[in-house]
Image (spheres, rainbow, N blue to C red):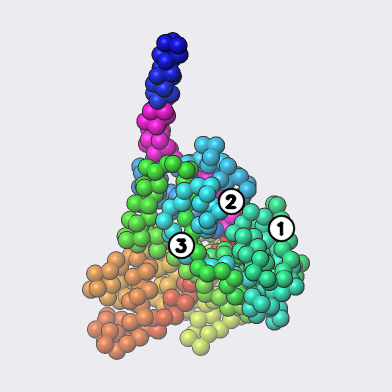
Amino acid sequence: MKRKQWITPALILILLSLSLFALFGRKNVLHKINKSGEITVITRNNAHCYYTYRNSPMGFEYDLAKAFSDYLGVKLKVITPPWEYLINTLDEGKGDFVAASLTITPSREKLADFSDGYLTIQQKAILHTNDHQIKKIEDLEGKTIHVRRGTSYQERLNELKNDGLNINIKLYDDMPTEELIRMVAEKEIQVTIADSNIALLNRRYYPDIKIAFPIEEEQSIGWAIKKGEKALLKKVNEFFKKIKENGTLAKIYQKYYTNVEIFDYVDLKKYHQRLETRLPKYKKIIQKAAKKYDLDWRLIAAVIYQESHFNPEAISFTGVEGIMQVTLGTATDMGIKDRRDPYQSIMGGARYLKKLYKKYSDAKDPDRLFIALASYNVGHRHILDAQTIAKERNLNPNSWSALEQTLPLLRYYKYYKITKYGYCRGTEPIRYVNRIITYYDILKREAIS
Protein backbone atom coordinates (compact mmCIF):
# COMPACT_ATOMS: atom_id res chain seq x y z
CA MET A 1 0.00 0.00 0.00
CA LYS A 2 2.81 2.36 0.88
CA ARG A 3 4.59 1.46 -2.38
CA LYS A 4 1.49 2.39 -4.34
CA GLN A 5 1.36 5.79 -2.62
CA TRP A 6 5.05 6.35 -3.44
CA ILE A 7 4.68 5.43 -7.16
CA THR A 8 1.78 7.79 -7.81
CA PRO A 9 3.61 11.03 -6.88
CA ALA A 10 6.67 9.81 -8.80
CA LEU A 11 4.65 9.26 -11.93
CA ILE A 12 3.12 12.68 -11.53
CA LEU A 13 6.57 14.26 -11.28
CA ILE A 14 7.77 12.42 -14.39
CA LEU A 15 4.72 13.44 -16.39
CA LEU A 16 5.06 17.02 -15.19
CA SER A 17 8.73 17.08 -16.21
CA LEU A 18 7.88 15.76 -19.66
CA SER A 19 5.16 18.38 -20.04
CA LEU A 20 7.51 21.19 -19.03
CA PHE A 21 10.14 19.92 -21.47
CA ALA A 22 7.57 19.83 -24.25
CA LEU A 23 6.48 23.35 -23.40
CA PHE A 24 9.83 25.02 -22.81
CA GLY A 25 12.43 22.64 -24.19
CA ARG A 26 11.10 22.50 -27.74
CA LYS A 27 12.54 25.24 -29.90
CA ASN A 28 9.92 27.23 -31.77
CA VAL A 29 9.98 27.60 -35.54
CA LEU A 30 11.26 31.17 -35.44
CA HIS A 31 14.25 30.06 -33.35
CA LYS A 32 15.05 27.33 -35.89
CA ILE A 33 14.73 29.82 -38.76
CA ASN A 34 17.15 32.24 -37.15
CA LYS A 35 19.58 29.45 -36.29
CA SER A 36 19.56 27.88 -39.77
CA GLY A 37 19.54 31.20 -41.61
CA GLU A 38 16.75 29.99 -43.90
CA ILE A 39 12.97 30.20 -44.05
CA THR A 40 10.78 28.02 -46.27
CA VAL A 41 7.63 29.40 -47.86
CA ILE A 42 4.88 27.08 -49.05
CA THR A 43 3.17 28.60 -52.07
CA ARG A 44 1.59 27.84 -55.43
CA ASN A 45 3.12 27.88 -58.89
CA ASN A 46 0.86 30.23 -60.81
CA ALA A 47 0.62 33.76 -62.17
CA HIS A 48 -0.43 35.40 -58.90
CA CYS A 49 1.72 33.51 -56.36
CA TYR A 50 5.05 32.37 -57.75
CA TYR A 51 6.65 31.63 -61.11
CA THR A 52 9.99 31.99 -62.83
CA TYR A 53 10.76 34.26 -65.74
CA ARG A 54 14.16 34.19 -67.45
CA ASN A 55 15.49 32.18 -64.54
CA SER A 56 14.32 34.77 -62.02
CA PRO A 57 11.60 34.17 -59.43
CA MET A 58 8.53 36.40 -59.58
CA GLY A 59 4.97 36.62 -58.26
CA PHE A 60 3.02 38.73 -55.79
CA GLU A 61 3.28 36.21 -52.96
CA TYR A 62 6.92 35.46 -53.77
CA ASP A 63 7.88 39.13 -53.56
CA LEU A 64 6.14 39.44 -50.20
CA ALA A 65 7.83 36.29 -48.91
CA LYS A 66 11.22 37.53 -50.13
CA ALA A 67 10.65 40.85 -48.38
CA PHE A 68 9.82 38.93 -45.19
CA SER A 69 12.97 36.81 -45.42
CA ASP A 70 14.99 40.00 -45.90
CA TYR A 71 13.21 41.47 -42.88
CA LEU A 72 14.37 38.48 -40.83
CA GLY A 73 17.83 38.53 -42.39
CA VAL A 74 17.63 34.96 -43.68
CA LYS A 75 17.56 33.19 -47.05
CA LEU A 76 14.28 32.19 -48.69
CA LYS A 77 13.49 28.68 -49.90
CA VAL A 78 10.38 28.06 -51.99
CA ILE A 79 8.36 24.85 -52.21
CA THR A 80 5.19 24.38 -54.27
CA PRO A 81 3.16 21.32 -53.20
CA PRO A 82 -0.23 20.60 -54.78
CA TRP A 83 -3.05 22.89 -53.67
CA GLU A 84 -4.72 20.28 -51.45
CA TYR A 85 -1.47 19.66 -49.51
CA LEU A 86 -0.61 23.25 -48.59
CA ILE A 87 -1.72 22.99 -44.95
CA ASN A 88 -0.54 19.37 -44.62
CA THR A 89 2.92 20.43 -45.76
CA LEU A 90 2.87 23.11 -43.07
CA ASP A 91 1.76 20.66 -40.37
CA GLU A 92 4.46 18.17 -41.37
CA GLY A 93 7.12 20.83 -40.81
CA LYS A 94 8.29 20.84 -44.44
CA GLY A 95 7.67 24.57 -44.65
CA ASP A 96 7.41 27.45 -42.21
CA PHE A 97 4.44 29.40 -43.55
CA VAL A 98 1.92 29.33 -46.38
CA ALA A 99 1.80 32.35 -48.69
CA ALA A 100 -0.63 31.29 -51.39
CA SER A 101 -3.39 33.90 -51.60
CA LEU A 102 -5.47 32.04 -49.04
CA THR A 103 -8.64 33.76 -47.89
CA ILE A 104 -9.10 33.68 -44.14
CA THR A 105 -12.16 31.54 -43.43
CA PRO A 106 -13.48 29.94 -40.20
CA SER A 107 -12.83 26.44 -41.54
CA ARG A 108 -9.22 27.26 -42.40
CA GLU A 109 -8.64 28.93 -39.04
CA LYS A 110 -9.37 25.55 -37.44
CA LEU A 111 -6.41 24.10 -39.33
CA ALA A 112 -3.84 26.89 -38.97
CA ASP A 113 -3.26 30.29 -37.42
CA PHE A 114 -3.53 33.21 -39.83
CA SER A 115 -1.74 36.52 -40.00
CA ASP A 116 -3.56 39.81 -40.15
CA GLY A 117 -5.08 40.33 -43.59
CA TYR A 118 -2.86 42.10 -46.11
CA LEU A 119 -5.16 42.18 -49.14
CA THR A 120 -8.93 42.51 -49.46
CA ILE A 121 -10.69 40.56 -52.20
CA GLN A 122 -14.15 39.39 -53.22
CA GLN A 123 -15.33 36.18 -54.80
CA LYS A 124 -16.69 37.00 -58.26
CA ALA A 125 -18.74 35.07 -60.79
CA ILE A 126 -16.74 34.59 -64.00
CA LEU A 127 -18.73 34.45 -67.24
CA HIS A 128 -18.13 34.74 -70.97
CA THR A 129 -18.51 38.28 -72.30
CA ASN A 130 -21.34 37.09 -74.55
CA ASP A 131 -23.33 35.72 -71.61
CA HIS A 132 -26.09 38.25 -70.93
CA GLN A 133 -28.44 35.91 -69.07
CA ILE A 134 -26.66 35.84 -65.73
CA LYS A 135 -26.57 39.29 -64.12
CA LYS A 136 -27.03 38.59 -60.41
CA ILE A 137 -26.78 35.77 -57.88
CA GLU A 138 -30.43 34.81 -58.36
CA ASP A 139 -29.76 34.19 -62.06
CA LEU A 140 -27.50 31.28 -61.06
CA GLU A 141 -30.67 29.30 -60.28
CA GLY A 142 -30.49 25.95 -62.07
CA LYS A 143 -26.95 26.58 -63.35
CA THR A 144 -23.88 24.38 -62.91
CA ILE A 145 -20.97 26.20 -61.30
CA HIS A 146 -17.50 24.72 -61.69
CA VAL A 147 -14.94 25.17 -58.89
CA ARG A 148 -12.02 23.37 -57.33
CA ARG A 149 -12.70 21.10 -54.38
CA GLY A 150 -11.60 22.40 -50.99
CA THR A 151 -11.66 26.08 -51.94
CA SER A 152 -13.46 28.95 -50.25
CA TYR A 153 -15.57 29.08 -53.42
CA GLN A 154 -16.98 25.65 -52.60
CA GLU A 155 -17.75 26.81 -49.05
CA ARG A 156 -19.63 29.87 -50.28
CA LEU A 157 -21.59 27.95 -52.92
CA ASN A 158 -22.65 25.42 -50.29
CA GLU A 159 -23.90 28.30 -48.14
CA LEU A 160 -25.93 29.67 -51.06
CA LYS A 161 -27.32 26.20 -51.72
CA ASN A 162 -28.29 25.76 -48.07
CA ASP A 163 -30.01 29.15 -48.21
CA GLY A 164 -32.29 27.82 -50.93
CA LEU A 165 -30.53 28.69 -54.20
CA ASN A 166 -30.97 25.74 -56.56
CA ILE A 167 -27.51 25.34 -58.07
CA ASN A 168 -25.39 22.43 -59.18
CA ILE A 169 -21.79 22.47 -57.94
CA LYS A 170 -19.29 20.65 -60.11
CA LEU A 171 -16.11 19.98 -58.11
CA TYR A 172 -12.65 19.29 -59.53
CA ASP A 173 -9.85 17.62 -57.60
CA ASP A 174 -6.94 18.82 -59.72
CA MET A 175 -8.04 21.88 -61.65
CA PRO A 176 -6.49 25.30 -60.95
CA THR A 177 -8.84 28.27 -60.94
CA GLU A 178 -6.85 29.70 -63.84
CA GLU A 179 -7.74 26.66 -65.93
CA LEU A 180 -11.42 27.00 -65.09
CA ILE A 181 -11.25 30.64 -66.18
CA ARG A 182 -9.76 29.48 -69.49
CA MET A 183 -12.63 27.02 -69.87
CA VAL A 184 -15.14 29.85 -69.45
CA ALA A 185 -13.28 31.93 -72.04
CA GLU A 186 -13.43 29.05 -74.52
CA LYS A 187 -17.08 28.28 -73.68
CA GLU A 188 -16.31 24.83 -72.33
CA ILE A 189 -18.20 25.74 -69.15
CA GLN A 190 -20.61 28.57 -68.41
CA VAL A 191 -19.56 29.87 -65.01
CA THR A 192 -16.86 29.57 -62.39
CA ILE A 193 -15.90 31.56 -59.31
CA ALA A 194 -12.60 33.35 -58.67
CA ASP A 195 -11.17 35.81 -56.20
CA SER A 196 -11.12 39.31 -57.66
CA ASN A 197 -7.32 39.54 -57.72
CA ILE A 198 -6.99 36.23 -59.58
CA ALA A 199 -9.72 37.28 -62.00
CA LEU A 200 -8.02 40.60 -62.75
CA LEU A 201 -4.70 38.94 -63.52
CA ASN A 202 -6.24 36.35 -65.81
CA ARG A 203 -8.57 38.67 -67.71
CA ARG A 204 -5.64 40.08 -69.66
CA TYR A 205 -4.80 36.57 -70.86
CA TYR A 206 -8.41 35.64 -71.55
CA PRO A 207 -10.15 38.84 -72.71
CA ASP A 208 -13.33 36.88 -73.49
CA ILE A 209 -14.13 36.53 -69.78
CA LYS A 210 -16.36 38.88 -67.84
CA ILE A 211 -15.77 39.54 -64.15
CA ALA A 212 -19.39 39.72 -63.04
CA PHE A 213 -21.09 40.20 -59.67
CA PRO A 214 -19.72 39.29 -56.22
CA ILE A 215 -21.16 36.24 -54.48
CA GLU A 216 -19.62 37.00 -51.09
CA GLU A 217 -18.78 39.96 -48.88
CA GLU A 218 -15.20 41.23 -48.95
CA GLN A 219 -12.67 38.83 -47.47
CA SER A 220 -9.07 39.13 -46.36
CA ILE A 221 -6.07 37.18 -47.59
CA GLY A 222 -3.47 36.15 -45.03
CA TRP A 223 -0.48 33.88 -44.44
CA ALA A 224 -1.02 30.57 -42.65
CA ILE A 225 1.24 29.66 -39.71
CA LYS A 226 1.33 26.31 -37.91
CA LYS A 227 -0.91 26.23 -34.85
CA GLY A 228 0.89 27.35 -31.71
CA GLU A 229 3.81 29.13 -33.39
CA LYS A 230 3.06 32.43 -31.68
CA ALA A 231 6.55 33.91 -32.08
CA LEU A 232 6.55 33.50 -35.87
CA LEU A 233 2.97 34.75 -36.14
CA LYS A 234 3.87 37.85 -34.16
CA LYS A 235 6.87 38.48 -36.42
CA VAL A 236 4.73 38.12 -39.55
CA ASN A 237 2.18 40.61 -38.25
CA GLU A 238 4.95 43.06 -37.32
CA PHE A 239 6.29 42.68 -40.86
CA PHE A 240 2.94 43.39 -42.51
CA LYS A 241 2.39 46.41 -40.26
CA LYS A 242 5.77 47.78 -41.30
CA ILE A 243 5.38 47.26 -45.06
CA LYS A 244 1.92 48.82 -44.99
CA GLU A 245 3.34 51.89 -43.28
CA ASN A 246 6.48 52.29 -45.41
CA GLY A 247 4.77 51.69 -48.76
CA THR A 248 6.47 48.40 -49.62
CA LEU A 249 3.18 46.50 -49.76
CA ALA A 250 1.64 49.12 -52.05
CA LYS A 251 4.68 49.00 -54.32
CA ILE A 252 4.55 45.20 -54.65
CA TYR A 253 0.81 45.34 -55.27
CA GLN A 254 1.31 48.00 -57.92
CA LYS A 255 3.91 45.85 -59.64
CA TYR A 256 1.50 42.97 -60.16
CA TYR A 257 -2.02 44.33 -60.01
CA THR A 258 -2.26 48.03 -60.85
CA ASN A 259 -1.76 47.64 -64.57
CA VAL A 260 -4.19 44.71 -64.82
CA GLU A 261 -7.04 47.01 -63.85
CA ILE A 262 -6.48 48.91 -67.10
CA PHE A 263 -8.56 46.84 -69.45
CA ASP A 264 -9.87 47.51 -72.94
CA TYR A 265 -11.69 44.45 -74.24
CA VAL A 266 -11.63 45.48 -77.92
CA ASP A 267 -7.95 46.45 -77.81
CA LEU A 268 -6.83 43.27 -76.06
CA LYS A 269 -8.84 41.11 -78.43
CA LYS A 270 -7.11 42.85 -81.32
CA TYR A 271 -3.75 42.47 -79.59
CA HIS A 272 -4.12 38.72 -79.20
CA GLN A 273 -5.15 38.44 -82.86
CA ARG A 274 -2.17 40.45 -84.07
CA LEU A 275 0.25 38.47 -81.96
CA GLU A 276 -0.76 35.57 -84.17
CA THR A 277 -1.11 37.33 -87.52
CA ARG A 278 1.49 40.14 -87.53
CA LEU A 279 4.15 39.47 -84.90
CA PRO A 280 5.63 36.36 -86.62
CA LYS A 281 6.61 38.44 -89.65
CA TYR A 282 8.89 40.67 -87.55
CA LYS A 283 9.84 38.37 -84.67
CA LYS A 284 13.32 37.48 -85.95
CA ILE A 285 14.23 41.13 -86.46
CA ILE A 286 12.90 41.98 -83.00
CA GLN A 287 14.91 39.16 -81.43
CA LYS A 288 18.05 40.27 -83.27
CA ALA A 289 17.61 43.83 -81.97
CA ALA A 290 16.94 42.52 -78.47
CA LYS A 291 20.13 40.48 -78.49
CA LYS A 292 22.23 43.35 -79.84
CA TYR A 293 20.99 45.91 -77.32
CA ASP A 294 20.43 43.58 -74.35
CA LEU A 295 16.68 44.08 -74.18
CA ASP A 296 13.83 41.60 -73.79
CA TRP A 297 12.36 40.97 -77.24
CA ARG A 298 8.90 40.88 -75.68
CA LEU A 299 9.38 44.42 -74.43
CA ILE A 300 10.33 45.60 -77.92
CA ALA A 301 7.30 43.80 -79.36
CA ALA A 302 5.05 45.47 -76.77
CA VAL A 303 6.44 48.90 -77.70
CA ILE A 304 5.90 48.18 -81.39
CA TYR A 305 2.29 47.18 -80.82
CA GLN A 306 1.62 50.32 -78.80
CA GLU A 307 3.30 52.50 -81.42
CA SER A 308 2.01 51.02 -84.69
CA HIS A 309 0.16 47.72 -84.16
CA PHE A 310 2.99 46.11 -86.16
CA ASN A 311 2.27 48.38 -89.15
CA PRO A 312 5.52 49.52 -90.86
CA GLU A 313 3.60 52.12 -92.89
CA ALA A 314 2.10 53.86 -89.86
CA ILE A 315 2.28 57.67 -89.86
CA SER A 316 1.23 59.97 -87.02
CA PHE A 317 0.03 63.55 -87.26
CA THR A 318 3.01 64.43 -85.06
CA GLY A 319 5.40 63.44 -87.85
CA VAL A 320 6.62 60.14 -86.45
CA GLU A 321 6.71 57.23 -88.87
CA GLY A 322 7.27 53.52 -89.19
CA ILE A 323 6.79 50.42 -87.12
CA MET A 324 8.45 52.04 -84.07
CA GLN A 325 7.19 55.57 -84.78
CA VAL A 326 10.52 57.37 -84.50
CA THR A 327 10.93 61.09 -85.16
CA LEU A 328 13.05 62.38 -88.02
CA GLY A 329 15.64 63.67 -85.56
CA THR A 330 15.85 60.34 -83.75
CA ALA A 331 16.09 58.54 -87.07
CA THR A 332 19.08 60.68 -88.02
CA ASP A 333 20.77 60.11 -84.65
CA MET A 334 20.16 56.35 -84.79
CA GLY A 335 21.24 55.92 -88.40
CA ILE A 336 17.77 55.15 -89.76
CA LYS A 337 17.66 56.20 -93.41
CA ASP A 338 14.19 54.88 -94.15
CA ARG A 339 11.79 54.95 -91.21
CA ARG A 340 9.30 52.75 -93.07
CA ASP A 341 11.83 49.98 -93.46
CA PRO A 342 10.92 47.52 -90.66
CA TYR A 343 14.50 46.32 -90.16
CA GLN A 344 15.97 49.82 -89.87
CA SER A 345 13.12 51.05 -87.72
CA ILE A 346 13.23 48.14 -85.26
CA MET A 347 17.02 48.14 -84.94
CA GLY A 348 17.17 51.92 -84.57
CA GLY A 349 14.19 52.10 -82.24
CA ALA A 350 15.64 49.43 -79.96
CA ARG A 351 18.96 51.24 -79.94
CA TYR A 352 17.20 54.46 -78.95
CA LEU A 353 15.22 52.76 -76.18
CA LYS A 354 18.45 51.32 -74.77
CA LYS A 355 20.05 54.75 -74.94
CA LEU A 356 17.19 56.18 -72.88
CA TYR A 357 17.41 53.32 -70.41
CA LYS A 358 21.10 54.05 -69.84
CA LYS A 359 20.29 57.71 -69.31
CA TYR A 360 18.28 56.98 -66.16
CA SER A 361 20.99 55.05 -64.33
CA ASP A 362 20.08 56.71 -61.02
CA ALA A 363 16.74 54.89 -61.04
CA LYS A 364 16.29 51.24 -60.15
CA ASP A 365 14.17 48.77 -62.08
CA PRO A 366 11.28 48.61 -62.67
CA ASP A 367 11.16 52.41 -62.25
CA ARG A 368 14.11 52.82 -64.59
CA LEU A 369 12.35 50.95 -67.38
CA PHE A 370 9.07 52.82 -66.85
CA ILE A 371 10.86 56.20 -67.01
CA ALA A 372 12.74 55.17 -70.16
CA LEU A 373 9.46 54.14 -71.81
CA ALA A 374 7.83 57.43 -70.84
CA SER A 375 10.82 59.25 -72.29
CA TYR A 376 10.45 57.29 -75.55
CA ASN A 377 6.88 58.56 -75.71
CA VAL A 378 7.11 62.16 -74.57
CA GLY A 379 10.80 63.03 -74.76
CA HIS A 380 13.62 63.25 -72.25
CA ARG A 381 13.19 66.97 -71.68
CA HIS A 382 9.68 66.70 -70.30
CA ILE A 383 10.84 63.91 -68.02
CA LEU A 384 13.47 66.31 -66.67
CA ASP A 385 10.75 68.89 -65.97
CA ALA A 386 8.64 66.29 -64.17
CA GLN A 387 11.68 65.24 -62.13
CA THR A 388 12.33 68.87 -61.20
CA ILE A 389 8.78 69.25 -59.91
CA ALA A 390 9.18 65.98 -58.01
CA LYS A 391 12.27 67.33 -56.24
CA GLU A 392 10.42 70.53 -55.32
CA ARG A 393 7.69 68.40 -53.75
CA ASN A 394 10.20 66.30 -51.81
CA LEU A 395 9.42 63.28 -53.97
CA ASN A 396 11.99 60.88 -55.37
CA PRO A 397 12.70 62.05 -58.96
CA ASN A 398 13.84 58.54 -59.86
CA SER A 399 10.59 56.93 -58.75
CA TRP A 400 7.97 56.20 -61.39
CA SER A 401 5.18 56.59 -58.82
CA ALA A 402 6.43 60.14 -58.18
CA LEU A 403 6.52 60.98 -61.89
CA GLU A 404 3.00 59.59 -62.25
CA GLN A 405 2.04 62.46 -59.94
CA THR A 406 4.12 65.20 -61.55
CA LEU A 407 3.89 64.48 -65.28
CA PRO A 408 0.15 65.36 -65.43
CA LEU A 409 0.92 68.74 -63.85
CA LEU A 410 2.75 69.74 -67.04
CA ARG A 411 -0.67 70.25 -68.66
CA TYR A 412 -1.39 73.22 -66.41
CA TYR A 413 -0.11 76.71 -67.06
CA LYS A 414 0.77 77.41 -63.43
CA TYR A 415 3.28 74.56 -63.62
CA TYR A 416 4.58 74.49 -67.17
CA LYS A 417 5.14 78.24 -67.24
CA ILE A 418 7.99 77.81 -64.76
CA THR A 419 9.51 74.67 -66.28
CA LYS A 420 12.41 74.69 -68.71
CA TYR A 421 10.69 72.81 -71.54
CA GLY A 422 7.09 73.94 -71.20
CA TYR A 423 3.72 72.34 -71.90
CA CYS A 424 3.28 68.59 -72.12
CA ARG A 425 0.24 66.32 -72.32
CA GLY A 426 1.48 64.64 -69.18
CA THR A 427 -1.22 62.01 -68.81
CA GLU A 428 -0.31 60.44 -72.15
CA PRO A 429 3.06 58.94 -71.13
CA ILE A 430 1.39 57.39 -68.08
CA ARG A 431 -1.23 55.66 -70.22
CA TYR A 432 1.51 54.76 -72.69
CA VAL A 433 3.64 53.03 -70.06
CA ASN A 434 0.69 51.23 -68.50
CA ARG A 435 -0.43 49.84 -71.85
CA ILE A 436 3.05 48.69 -72.82
CA ILE A 437 3.52 46.92 -69.50
CA THR A 438 0.15 45.22 -70.00
CA TYR A 439 1.15 44.04 -73.49
CA TYR A 440 4.59 43.05 -72.18
CA ASP A 441 3.11 41.02 -69.31
CA ILE A 442 0.88 39.12 -71.72
CA LEU A 443 3.89 38.14 -73.81
CA LYS A 444 5.91 37.21 -70.72
CA ARG A 445 3.21 34.81 -69.60
CA GLU A 446 4.46 32.39 -72.22
CA ALA A 447 7.53 31.96 -70.00
CA ILE A 448 5.64 31.06 -66.81
CA SER A 449 6.97 27.77 -65.49
Q: Which x, y percent locates residue 421?
A: 31, 81
Residue 225 tag number: none
Badge 3 marks a residue whose secondary structure is: strand
Mark 2 sits on what residue? 45
Q: Residues within 10 Å of mark 3 (few under 14, many from 20)?
A: some
Foreground tag (2 vs 3)? 3
Q: Which residues are magenta?
A: 19-47
Pick the front one: 148 or 392: 148
Foreground tag (3 vs 1)? 1
Reading the chain from its start, which is encountered first: label 2 or label 3?
2
Identify which amino acid the numbered label 2 is placed on: Asn
Pick the front one: 52 or 344: 52
Q: Residues within 10 Å of mark 2 (few under 14, many from 20)?
A: some
Picture quarter containing residue 162? bottom right
Mark 3 sits on what residue? 119
- Side (left or right) of 54 relative to 247: right
The residues tagged by marks 2 and 3 sit, at their Cα atoms, a distance apart of: 19 Å
Pick the front one: 16 or 86: 16
Reading the chain from its start, which is encountered first: label 1 or label 2?
2
Identify which amino acid the numbered label 1 is placed on: Leu
* Residue drawn at point x = 59 percent, y = 55 percent: 46
Q: Is residue 67 magenta?
A: no
Mark 1 sits on what residue? 171
The residues tagged by marks 3 and 1 sit, at their Cα atoms, a distance apart of: 26 Å
Q: Which x, y percent locates residue 374?
A: 42, 72
| Residue contact between numbered discs 3 and 1, judged by CB atoms under 8 Å | no
- Side (left or right) of 394 relative to 169: left
Q: How many marks?
A: 3
Would you place residue 251 above or below residue 226 in this image? Answer: below
* Residue drawn at point x = 74 percent, y = 66 percent: 168
Reading the chain from its start, which is encountered first: label 3 or label 1?
3
Badge 2 marks a residue whose secondary structure is: loop
